[in-house]
Amino acid sequence: MDDADNYARARTRVRQIKGFYIHATVYVLVNAFLLITNIISSRGTIWFVWPLFGWGIGLVAHGIAVFGLRGLWGPEWEERKIKELIQKNRSR
């Protein structure tokens, strides 16, 4: 595999991760807005949880598609974090 292939794969991976983070951010912002709207408009009925759960299922599916089931906090993640922390300690 040459450098161009490595770069293309890394770029695709970064875009996938970025897409998930954007999705998660929009999820939080929209559902916070729905919560506030629910509190202001209809205090007796709690309806904001339905889109929260429904969209949450989609967000989890997106996360699994991007990171895999073990990718979030599996051995590869641990190894990356260890290397990251070692690098931070070296730069101090």
Image (cartoon, rainbow, N blue to C red):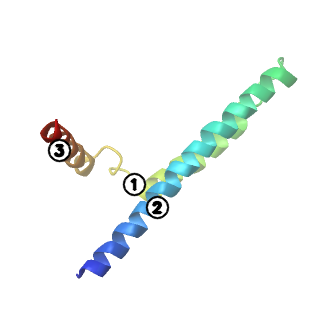
Circle 3 sits on which residue? Answer: 87
Q: Mark 1 is on which residue type?
A: Phe
Label 2 packing within 10 angstroms: few (<14), some (14-19), many (20+): some
Circle 1 sits on which residue? Answer: 67
CA distance separating discs 3 and 1? 23 Å
Q: Residue at x 34, y 67 (%)?
A: 10
Tag 1 secondary structure: helix
Relative image position of residue 51 (x, y in whole percent): 71, 40
Q: Nearer the viewer, mark 3 or mark 1?
A: 3
Tag 3 secondary structure: helix
**Of the pair 33 and 55, the residue shown nearer to us:** 33
CA distance separating discs 2 and 3? 25 Å
Q: Quadrant of the C terminus?
A: top left
Label 3 packing within 10 angstroms: few (<14), some (14-19), many (20+): few
CA distance separating discs 1 and 2? 9 Å
Q: Residue at x 15, y 36 (%)?
A: 89
Residue 11 occupies which quadrant of the picture? bottom left
N-terminal label among 2 and 3:
2
Residue 82 located left or right of residue 21: left
Residue 45 occupies which quadrant of the picture? top right
